[in-house]
Image (cartoon, coloured by chain):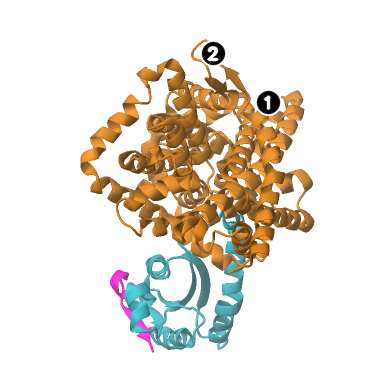
Chain colours: A cyan, B orange
Amino acid sequence: MPESIVVGLDGSEASGRAAEAAADAARRHDLRLLLACVVPWSPYSFTSAEENERRSVEKEREATAARERVLDPVVTRLSAPGDLEVEGVVRHGHPAETLVSLARDYDAAWITVGRVGQSRVRTMLFGSTPSSLIQLSPVPVLVVP
Amino acid sequence: MPSTSDSLLAATFDEQVDSFFAPVSEWITAVVFFAIPLDFIDEGVVLPLIVVWLVIAGFFFTVYLRGFQFRAFKHAIQLARGDYNDPRDAGEVTHFQALATAVSGTVGLGNIAGVAVAISLGGPGATLWMIIAGLVGMCTKGVECTLGVKYRNVYADGRVSGGPMYYLTKGLKEKSPKLGTFGKVLAVLFCIFTLGGAVGGGNMFQANQAFSQAQSVTGGADGPLGGGAAGAIFGLILALFVGAVIIGGIRSIARVTDKLVPFMAVFYVIACLTVLIANLTAVPEALWAIVSQAFTPEAGFGGVVGVLIQGFRRAAFSNEAGLGSAAIAHSAVKTSEPATEGHVAVLEPFIDTVVICTMTALAIVITGTYADEASAPGVQTTSAAFGTVVGWFPIVLAVAVVLFAYSTMLAWSYYGLKAATYLFGESMLVDRTWKLIFCIFVVIGASSTLDAVIGFSDSMIFLMSLPNIIGLYILARVVKKELFGYRARLEQGEILPVAERT
């Protein structure tokens, strides 16, 4: 039996709506809500020596900023009524791959994300997290407009 | 059009910079490249001791570590690919990133201009010696990067600082307290030479060759960059871009070049391959020229030594093995096993010298542009080789040269900064002073003649190898224990790829 719903948060309005929708569903199905903020990072990106030296410090700074600016306000808002078990995590990595991995680890019923709303050209060139998720995810993906 | 008086004034500015700089360069070159005359072999043959120093180190470690670099190759690729990266480590510096950073610091003008200089002065045979120097240099680099990680400083806030100054200080002290003082002296010397190398090979040589190529593709002496002060103006613009990143902290520019440079390196290799394919029938002859002329039987032993010296000298300048610079870049890697970075580092001289330099050499030898005495040895020789196939290739090369030069400057400004902060302490004053000096030398480099620049940059960069290699010899047993111990555990299956861990 699935235990949770994983929500990908990126600070956008759409991801906020995705979190609300997932919270409603979690209450109905009596599931935990896992709010995940993934800081994009690739082990194969090219960096300068100076950036490498400060990587650990930067990582910490990015994680703190993601937690404070994106994650905590939503966690506080959704857990305020007290009728829902809400957990927030910050991870570094490829957004879609990391959400899939979290869905496996937390035995998610599905993954909810907001629609990115970017142009066709941009999506064609760089892809989007929802479209990558649809290709990768072992569980259903709910995209909230 | 500037007026005649403007041109004269401008011309004097460039000449003034050069006339001030050339004697300094000549004096330093004479000291560093002190050479023993080998009259008993052939008249006029000289052997620079500093080159012998580097080559012996390469061969010593190759024998002492039983050809470690060749055995390390497969595992090095697995490590760089991330097979052994623990997912919990993700988010920090991977082996791939440490390698890519160090490669972007070394792949640069040494691969384009340095190779042309070696072949122009030593003939096609210099290529073979460059490759051999690259192969033994792989071992030296593995040794210094293992030590770089083993003795690095990890600060409370998570920053990491490493490099020869740290292993010379800590490693030698660990051996005995007496050696500790000696290690401190070596570390200080290393830092002084690194500062010189950073302004020389890591800065002035790059600025000079970037200007030379830009001038060449815009119409030479008669083009818009042919004026007297053009070098200084070009240098000033370049210095502004360097300063924007290193002083202004505009990392976005660096990020663009960091991404572009690896692609340019691939593009450069493709361009070389195009030259080779266009002259496919001439490839066997060129290869034969490289092998046979490495031993120049007609020139006697003296000729062989001359060619060998050119090859080794330019290879060392290109891949920086034995100089200790890469150990600074590799130290930031996230690993609990110093030997892993020793493995990954061996790939660097292979990519730089064995692959990229050989490509340049083949393009130059096949097209025969090195024999043209009208053009100065340097990037223009390579440009002419490219120009024989497609007319606009030199423009592409000019873009690559400027990007390579720029990224190398950023890397060396960092190496210099690490040396400066080791010598004078971590402070904003040291940081800013060093960066300002670095930018001033960009202008001087672009204004100075090639001879003066090459002499100075070679001298300073080669001097770094003196304290570094002394330290490597003293710490040789530590490295052997580290590398062989790791390999034994690897072979016994104690260290498994992440996918096979339970």
Q: Amino acid at mark 2?
A: Asp
Q: Is residue B183 visible from the viewing direction of this image?
A: yes
Q: Residue at x 64, y 58 (%)?
A: B232
Q: Position of residue A1 (x, y in %)?
A: 33, 73
Name the residue beneath numbered marker 1.
B175
Please determine if labels 2 and 1 lie on a single subunit. yes
To which quarter of the image does residue A144 belong? bottom left
Give the vertical position of B52 relative to A78 (above or below). above
Q: Tell which residue pokes out farthest to the left in this image.
A: B281
Q: Which residues are magenta?
A: A133-145
Q: Local crowd at mark 1 within 10 Å, few (<14), some, or many (≥20)?
A: few
Q: Is residue B88 visible from the viewing direction of this image?
A: no
Q: Position of residue B125 (x, y in %)?
A: 38, 29
Residue B421 is inside the magenta segment: no
Q: Nearer the viewer, residue B207 or A119?
A: B207
Q: Tell which residue pokes out farthest to the front in this image.
A: B4
Depth check, mark 2 against mark 1: the one in front is 2
Give the vertical position of B141 relative to B245 (above or below). above
Q: Amino acid at mark 1?
A: Lys
Number of numbered discs on residues: 2
Name the residue beneath numbered marker 2.
B39
Q: Are marks 2 and 1 in contact (CB under 8 Å)?
A: no
Mark 1 — on which chain does it sit? Answer: B
